[in-house]
C-alpha cells in the first residue's frame, strides 16, 4: 500500500500557534508529497492570513466552518482530504524535522490502520509548559501511558498526534461530537471494529499544552469527568488504575488528618513521593525551577482528574443508592 498523507489540523483562535506548526512542516526531511488541511472551527481570531503565507511552501488548503468542536472539525478535514492516511495534529504542537519520515518508516515496518505518537517538551517552552509536559508523560505520574513501549500494541492514540487510515474513517465515521475524550472514544471504536493501533515511539511532537495552572486544572478535571462515561459506554476497557488519582486525594486528606493525631507515616509516604518527582523532573530537565513546578503540576493533575472522576462516578451511584434505599423502606 502506497501511503499518501493528509495532515489535518483543527484550529480555534490560535493563529500564532499554527504559524509555528506550519513552519515546522516546511522543514520536513521527507521526499514524498503530502497535503495539509487547516480547518478553522468558527474562530473570531482566524488564521486565514497566516495560512496564506504558506501556500508557496506547502500543499495547503484552508477551510472555515461554524464552531462544532475539534472532533467534528477533524472529520470535516478528513472529508476534504485527498490522501489515504490522515495524520491528525493539534494546532499547539511543533513537529521535528524527521516526523513524517518516522511515521512512514514505522508504518512500513509494521502497518496498522491507526497509530499514535508521544509528546515531548521543546527547549523553547516556558518552565511551566515543561513542568506540565513532565506531569502528563512521566512514568511516575501517569505510568508512561503516552509513550510506554509495553503498551505499544494496545496504545490509545491522542488527537494531538495520531493517524488513521481512510478505511477506518469510512467505517467509524471518525470522531464523535463530544468535546473531551473524543480521541479515546474513537480508539475504542477502532478496536471494536477489529483494527489494531500502535505506538510509533520515534514519531513524537513537541506539545505546548496549557500555559496557566488554572487552565491546566480545568483540563485535567474535564478529563476526569469523561473517564466514568467512557467506562460505562465501553465496560470492557475499565481499569482499576483510573481510580488512582481519586484514591490519591483521599490518601492525602487522610494523611493530614492522621498527622494531627501524631501519625506521620502516611505523610512521610507523600513527602517521599513528591521528593522523587522533584528529583526525576530535575534530572530530565536540568532545571530546579522546572522541577519545583513539576511537583505543583503533578499535584494539580491528580486533584483535577481525581475530583472530576469522583464527581461523575458519585452522580451515577447516588440515584441508584437512593432508589435501592427507598425500595427497602417500602
Image (cartoon, helix red, strand yellow):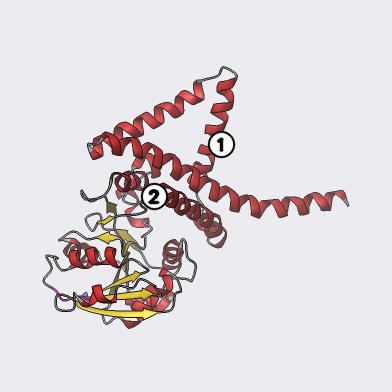
In the drawing, what numbered circle is on residue 153?
none
Helix, strand or loop under label 2: loop
> Which residue is nearer to you in this view: 217 or 136?
217
Q: Residue furthest front?
A: 45
Query: Residue 207: x percent and y percent?
Result: 29, 55
Rounded to the nearest angstrom, the CA distance separating label 2 from label 1 is 25 Å
Residue 242 visible here:
no
Image check: 70 left or right of 3?
A: right
Placement of 12 over or under 119, stated as above or below: below
The span shown in magenta is: 32-36
User: Which quadrant of the structure image shows residue 116?
Assistant: bottom left
Contact between marks 2 and 1 (CB within 8 A): the answer is no
Say if the magenta span includes residue 315. no
Query: Residue 222: x percent and y percent?
Result: 49, 55
Identify the residue shown where x is 35% and y is 46%. 132
The residue wearing badge 1 is 250
Q: Main secondary structure of the magenta part?
A: loop
Query: Residue 304: x percent and y percent?
Result: 49, 47
Identify the residue shown where x is 31% and y is 65%. 91
In the drawing, what numbered circle is on residue 212?
2
Residue 61 visible here:
yes
Of mark 2 and mark 1, the one earlier in the sequence is 2
Amino acid at each position: 500500500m502506497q501511503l499518501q498523507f493528509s495532515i489535518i489540523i483543527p484550529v480555534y483562535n490560535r493563529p500564532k500557534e499554527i504559524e509555528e506548526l506550519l513552519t515546522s512542516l516546511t522543514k520536513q526531511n521527507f521526499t514524498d508529497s503530502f497535503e495539509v488541511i487547516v480547518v478553522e472551527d468558527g474562530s473570531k481570531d482566524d488564521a486565514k492570513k497566516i495560512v496564506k503565507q504558506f501556500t508557496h511552501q506547502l500543499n495547503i488548503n484552508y477551510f472555515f466552518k461554524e464552531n462544532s468542536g475539534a472532533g467534528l472539525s477533524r472529520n470535516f478535514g478528513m472529508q476534504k482530504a485527498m490522501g489515504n492516511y490522515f495524520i491528525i495534529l493539534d494546532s499547539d504542537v511543533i513537529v521535528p524535522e524527521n516526523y513524517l519520515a518516522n511515521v512512514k518508516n514505522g508504518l512500513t515496518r509494521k502497518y496498522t490502520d491507526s497509530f499514535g505518537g508521544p509528546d515531548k517538551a521543546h527547549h523553547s517552552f516556558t518552565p511551566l509548559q515543561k513542568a506540565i509536559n513532565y506531569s502528563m508523560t512521566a512514568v511516575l505520574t501517569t505510568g508512561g501511558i503516552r509513550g510506554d513501549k509495553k503498551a505499544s500494541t494496545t496504545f490509545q492514540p491522542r488527537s494531538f498526534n495520531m493517524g488513521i487510515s481512510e478505511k477506518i474513517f469510512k467505517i467509524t465515521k471518525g470522531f464523535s461530537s463530544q468535546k473531551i475524550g473524543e480521541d479515546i472514544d474513537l480508539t475504542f471504536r477502532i478496536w471494536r471494529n477489529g483494527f489494531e493501533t500502535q505506538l510509533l515511539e520515534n514519531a513524537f511532537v513537541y506539545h505546548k499544552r496549557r500555559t496557566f495552572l488554572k487552565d491546566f486544572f480545568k483540563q485535567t478535571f474535564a478529563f476526569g469527568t469523561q473517564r466514568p462515561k467512557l467506562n460505562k459506554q465501553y465496560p470492557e476497557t475499565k481499569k482499576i488504575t483510573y481510580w488512582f488519582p481519586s484514591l490519591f486525594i483521599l490518601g492525602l486528606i487522610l494523611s493530614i488528618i492522621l498527622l494531627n493525631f501524631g501519625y506521620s507515616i502516611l505523610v512521610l509516604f507523600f513527602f517521599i513521593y513528591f521528593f522523587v518527582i522533584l528529583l526525576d523532573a530535575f534530572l530530565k530537565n536540568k532545571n530546579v525551577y522546572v522541577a519545583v513546578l513539576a511537583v505543583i503540576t503533578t499535584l494539580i493533575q491528580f486533584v483535577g482528574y481525581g475530583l472530576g472522576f469522583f464527581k461523575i462516578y458519585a452522580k451515577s451511584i447516588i440515584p441508584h443508592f437512593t432508589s435501592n434505599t427507598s425500595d427497602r423502606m417500602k
